[in-house]
Image: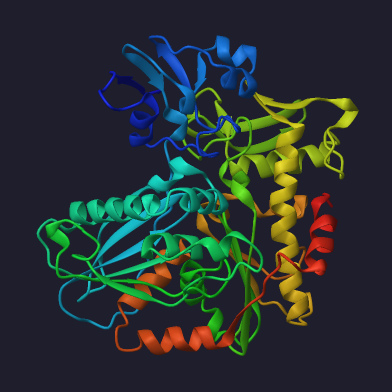
Amino acid sequence: MAEYVLLQPEPGKTLSDQLFGLGLEFPCGGCSACGGCRVRLVSGAIPITEGMRDALSEEELAAGWRLACQAETDGPVSLDIEQWSASILTDESRVEVEPSEGYGAVIDLGTTTLVVELVDLATGSVLGVLPGLNPQGRYGSDVMSRIEFDLREPGVLTGLIRRSIGAMLAELVRGRRLREVLICGNTVMHHLFCGESVEPLSHVPFRPSASGARCFTSEELGWPEQTHGAVVTFLPCAGGFVGSDLLAGLIACGMHQSERPIALMDLGTNGEIAFGGRKGILCTSTAAGPAFEGGRIRMGMRAGDGAIDRVERDGSGLVCHVIGGEAPRGICGSGLVDAAAVSLTTGSLAATGRLANGAKSLPLAGPVALSQADIRELQLAKGAVAAGLELLRQEAATDPSQVASLHLAGAFGNYVRVDSAHRIGLLPHWDAPVHPIGNSAVRGTRTLLLSPSRRQSLLDGLLHITRHVELAASPEFQEAFVENMTFP
């Protein structure tokens, strides 16, 4: 059932302030450029602006849809915001434990989501998990948007994320003595949390200003008293936009111990890829954008109630599965890949990405349809990822037949259907089995938390055999990217 939220005007707060506090994101930073912050007006009044008319159709406006970033009201309003309910992937897998006293915490600081785990250091048991949205999402859905904002308003995003994590930890600790906190995240999240300059990441060659581990006390970070006494470490980056979340993923999938080469792909907003084994690992990042999480897709949304998450064909056409069994309200990343794969098979979509017979949209279910622009966004995202993986394989001089396995990390990798990903060319047609491994960042970071005596040697060894490959200025990447833009 839909859940409606009643909001009253609050002094000093805009309607968008209140909505963000409820979990809405503003993918383009509140510029009304993407339409990604839609809410549906159930009661009350929100005037329609020119920005809303640019981003929404007359039918959508008539149905009550508005852009939250431009929403203003003088009275109470009731809004349907259910489609932004986040399904955030956590991980409580058992890992090897080196027992010690007290409690620790593991934090996966993603561009879009946050996961905080409280861990018993004696047993390795996960005592509590608190997922949430990264509050920086208000200022843009991707890392480049965050960089641009931080260059304009230095320190705002740093203070915001530190306060949010401190509050989440205080809620989990509940009187327990917190000894240590380990945080992983991509390079931009590392810099913004640690207060490092992101300016070098705003242009080629995208070199971090400080890629090493950074240590703080909870008091230094201004965290609540419940967390005082804890040592807080943000784990080191690998280089470029590849952060400690991928390093933790390498530990989780055992790439550093594998005799045969394996691949790891974490397909979030910032697509990170690694390829190799115990003799050497190559890693890179690609500007996949938020399409795999429903971002920049006109009717895109997270994998919550009302989202089309699977698309199949039968004799009469397309069959769409909707999360929650309700009327379709949008489409999430896995549904987007399915829809493209099925449409390629039926001939509704050409290998070039053009919709067949001059169609302007691809109807799916109810009001949900994909536009030509949506297909282009998918092509850009899958082209960048596929090209990145192929260039790492070529750089490693590895024949596809030698690859032992391909691991998919993150929420999108956990839910996307492998057959559909192969069909659109997102995944290569290797003989290697494909294994979704969930939130590998959390699992690998918890492994480090529970291995205090060998943590540093494990990180040092991993960094020693891992080499970052910068793709942005590579002519080979540009050629591979263009080639992989088309569908097989």
- Residue at 55% over, 33% down: 31
- Residue at 27% over, 83% down: 98
- Give the image location of residue 131, x and y in percent: 34, 50
- Asked whether residue 427 appears in the rendered view, the answer is no
Above/below status of 256 relative to 318: below
Q: Nearer the viewer, residue 125 or 32?
A: 32
- Give the image location of residue 170, x and y in percent: 19, 55
Q: Number of numbered discs present?
A: 0
Q: Nearer the viewer, residue 181 or 348?
A: 181
The quadrant where residue 2 appears: top left
- Residue at 21% over, 59% down: 222
**Residue 476 vs residue 444: left or right?**
right
Above/below status of 147 relative to 291: below
**Residue 312 vs residue 69: left or right?**
right
- Residue at 43% over, 53% down: 89
The quadrant where residue 58 appears: top right
